[in-house]
Image (cartoon, coloured by chain):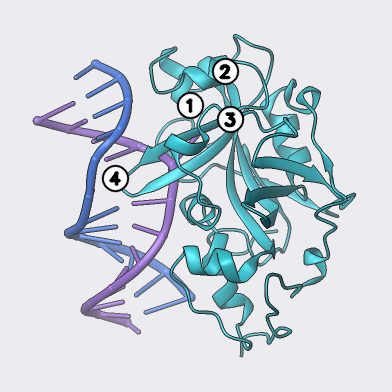
Chain colours: A cyan, B blue, C purple
Amino acid sequence: MPRRIAALKPGDVAHDPLADADIRGAAILPREFFNRDAITVARELLGKLLIRREGRRLLAGRIVEDEAYLGENDPAAHAYSGRTPRNFVLFGPPGRAYVYFIYGNHYCLNVSCMPEGEAECVLFRAMEPVFGTEAMARERGLELGPTATVTQLRMISSGPGRMSEALRITRERDNNKDLTSRRSDLWLGDDGFRPSTIVATPRVGITKAIDRPLRFAIAQNAYVSGKKIG
DNA sequence: GAGGAGATCGTCT
DNA sequence: GACGATCTCCTCT
């Protein structure tokens, strides 16, 4: 029997303890946050808010799963073979959005890490919807009523392609966007939430360097992609 | 619930 | 021309 949640209200919903978020009061993460190695950034991004401004409306989710990619030293990373027209953002300043199109269907969002010239990054894999839930569900083609279960809400943003669709992230619109700028319509916020336990597992969907524990998630969180872990 | 396969197109060789 | 940092649908158990 799936867990019942509180009724969806217009514009936003708080359906889980993790979802209690102060969106407008959240401090924007500065460039220095991303000017570090991808493993550190990936771990510290868990629990932060990914926020999109759509006109006068905000959409937001709390990051519950991500992966570190270690640039030219990482056989699974897009930057492994050096700079190309697709991945040039990774070699640029930290805190920029690297958006790529995959499998003919999906966009995936990363954020660049380390100083300019070093191509480490973090892939956002899943978030828990916390604000604008109904609007994000619509972007995903989902009809979620007042009795929506966590199982149904997971379909909004549990997976990199789903997250991007929910937040209307595309390469054309967002690639190379500065996520640390107050003028940006896409940024990361810190409202003080700290996850109690973080788990590390091998990354998903890759064929090289498959054993390294570079996927990070909030333990026992229902919105992690795939099976709940930790 | 688990596993398999198709969709679909940008990127790189 | 092959492959891919995915998702969805379908079938089987």
Q: Secondary structure at mark 2?
A: loop
Q: Earlier in the sequence, mark 4 or mark 1?
A: 1
Measured as percent of width and height from the top left, residue A224 is found at: 62, 59
Q: CA distance from mark 3 to mark 4?
A: 22 Å
Residue beneath disc 1: A77
Residue beneath disc 2: A119
- Chain identity of mark 2: A
Q: Which quadrant: the N terminus of chain A?
A: bottom right
Measured as percent of width and height from the top left, residue A125 is found at: 57, 48
Residue under the image location 68 percent in, 80 percent down: A8
Above or below A177: residue A87: above
Q: Amino acid at mark 1?
A: Ala
| Residue A73 visible to an observer of this rendering | no
Above or below B2: residue A52: above
Measured as percent of width and height from the top left, residue A70 is found at: 58, 23
Q: Nearer the viewer, mark 4 or mark 1?
A: 4
- Chain identity of mark 4: A
The answer to the question of whether label 3 and label 2 lie on touching residues, with beta carbons closer than 8 A, is: no
Residue beneath disc 4: A104
Q: CA distance from mark 3 to mark 2?
A: 16 Å
Task: Pick the residue in front: A223 or A104.
Answer: A104
Q: CA distance from mark 4 to mark 2?
A: 24 Å
Q: Secondary structure at mark 3?
A: loop
